[in-house]
Image: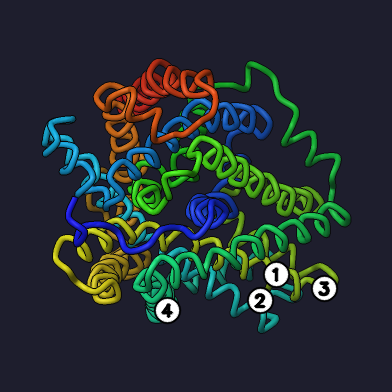
Amino acid sequence: MPESRCLQGIWSSPWIFIFAASGSAVGLGNIWKFPYVLGQNGGGAFLLVYCLCLLLVGLPVLIAEVALGRTVRSNPIDTVNDLSERRIVHSAWVVVPWIAGITGFLILSFYSVIAGWSFAYLERAISGDFMGITSSSATDMFSELLAEPSEMLLWHSVFVVLVVMTVGQSVTRGLSAVVRFLLPALVITLGALAVYSVSIGDMDSTLRFMFQWSWQDVTFDVVLAAVSLALFSLSVGMGAMFAYGAYINKRMSIARACTIVVGVDLLVALLSGLVIFPLVFAFQIDVEAGPSLTFVSLPIIFGNLIGGQFFASIFFLLLVIAALTSAISMLELFVAWLHEKFYIARLKAAFLMGVLVWFVGVAVLLSFNHWDSDIVLGLNFFEVLDSVTSLILLPIGAILLSILVAWFIPHAMLQNEMITQRLSHFQWWYNVLKYISIPAMVMITVAGWIGV
C-alpha cells in the first residue's frame, strides 16, 4: 500500500491502546445510561443477561472490528477498499465502514448535547446550586435547562471544540495523551465515590436489587435492552474500534487487549451502579426514573448529603471525562479518511467534521424546546436520531461487520491478526462470532423491529 495512505503513527504500547479503546467504550453509556436501564429492567436479571451479552456478543464483535481495522493499517474505508482491490472481498462491502462512520457521526451529534448537560450540571454543582434542593426544584432545574437553548448551545459548543482539538492532533500527541491520564483518573475517582456511596447508603437493598434474580425476570425486553446497551457501551458498530485497530502494532494480541477492554467497561458500569443505587435506595428515589435518574434524582441526593457539593462536583466531572473519552473515537473514522484520502491536515479535517456535528447538534438541542414537534411517528428530531441509530444503524453495522469478518475474510488472515498463542482461543472466538453472536443479533434486532 502506498505510504501516503498509511496512518501516521501507532499506539506507543499495548496499554495505551487498551486505555484508548476502554476510553471509547467507557462513556455516558456506563455512568449515565447503565444505571437507569438497569433500574428500568429489574436489576439482577438484566445485569446477568448484560454480562452474557458482553461475553457472547460484545467481545466477539469487538475483536472482529479491531482485527479488521489492523488488516492493512489504514482507515476503515480504505481498509475495505484495499481488501477489495486484492480480491479478498467484494467492493460492495465498503458500505460497512460508511454505515459505521455515519452512525458514529449521528450519535456524536446528540451525544455532545447530553455531554453539554453534564457541563451545565458540573457548573451548578461547583456553585452549590444543589444544596437543600427539593424534588420539585430539581425537576424545574432540569426543565429550565432544556428550555434554555442558549445555555445548551454554549456547552454543546465547548464540548465539540474539545473533541475537535483532541482528534485534530496526531495519535501520539492527541488521543494517547488524553486517555493516558483521563481513563485512570476516571476509574480511580469513580471507585472512591462508590466507596463513599456504599458507606452512607443502603447497601443491603442495593445488593438485592443488583445481584438477585429469577428466571421469570428474564424477558425478551430485558434481552433486547441488554444487547443494545452492550453494543452501545463498547462502541462497536460505529467505526470507533475499527479506526483504533488500525493503530495497533503487529505484535499485540488483539484477543487479550479486547478482553481487558470489556472487563474495564463492565467494571465502570458496576462502579456506577454502586455510586448511584445505595443513595437512591437510602433517599427512596424511584429506581425506574429513567434518563432523569442522573439529572433530576442525583442532585436531590447530593444536595442533602454532608459534603454533597464536593461529591456532586466530582460525579459530574466524571460524566464530562467519560463523554470526552468516548466522543473522540466517534470522530476518528472520517477524520482519518479525510486526512489520508485527500491529504487534509488532521486538525482541519477534525474542524470540518466538528462543524457538521455542531450544526446537527444545534437541531438536536432545539428539539427540546423551540422545535419540540413531531417529525415521524410522534417523535421529535432527537428521538428520531436516537431511534434510528440505536435500533437500526448500530445493530445493522455490527451485524454486517461480523458477517464480513466471519464469512468472507480468510481464516488464516484472521488468525494472524489476532496473534493468540492458543489455537483453541481463536477457534472459540471464531465459532462464537459465527454461530452465536451473528444469529443472536439478527434475531433480536428483527424481533425488536416487528415488535415481538
Q: Is residue 225 above or below residue 333?
A: above
Earlier sequence position, callout 4 versus callout 3: 4
Looking at this view, name the residue that lies furthest to the right. 199
* 2 and 4 marks in contact (CB < 8 Å): no
Earlier sequence position, callout 2 versus callout 1: 2
* 4 and 1 marks in contact (CB < 8 Å): no
Q: Amino acid at mark 1?
A: Ala
Earlier sequence position, callout 2 versus callout 4: 2
Question: Distance of mark 4 from mark 3, alpha carbons?
Answer: 28 Å
Q: Is residue 389 above or below residue 247?
A: above
Question: Distance of mark 4 from mark 1, alpha carbons?
Answer: 21 Å
Earlier sequence position, callout 1 versus callout 3: 3
Could you tell me residue 381's position as x and y percent?
A: 28, 56
Disc 1 residue crowd, few under 14, some 14–19, many 20+, Cα 10 Å: many
**The C terminus sits in image quarter:** top left
Q: Is residue 379 visible?
A: no
Q: Amino acid at mark 2?
A: Ala
The residue where tag 1 is placed is: 312
Could you tell me residue 401's position as x and y percent?
A: 30, 34
Q: Helix or strand or loop: what does disc 1 sit on?
A: helix
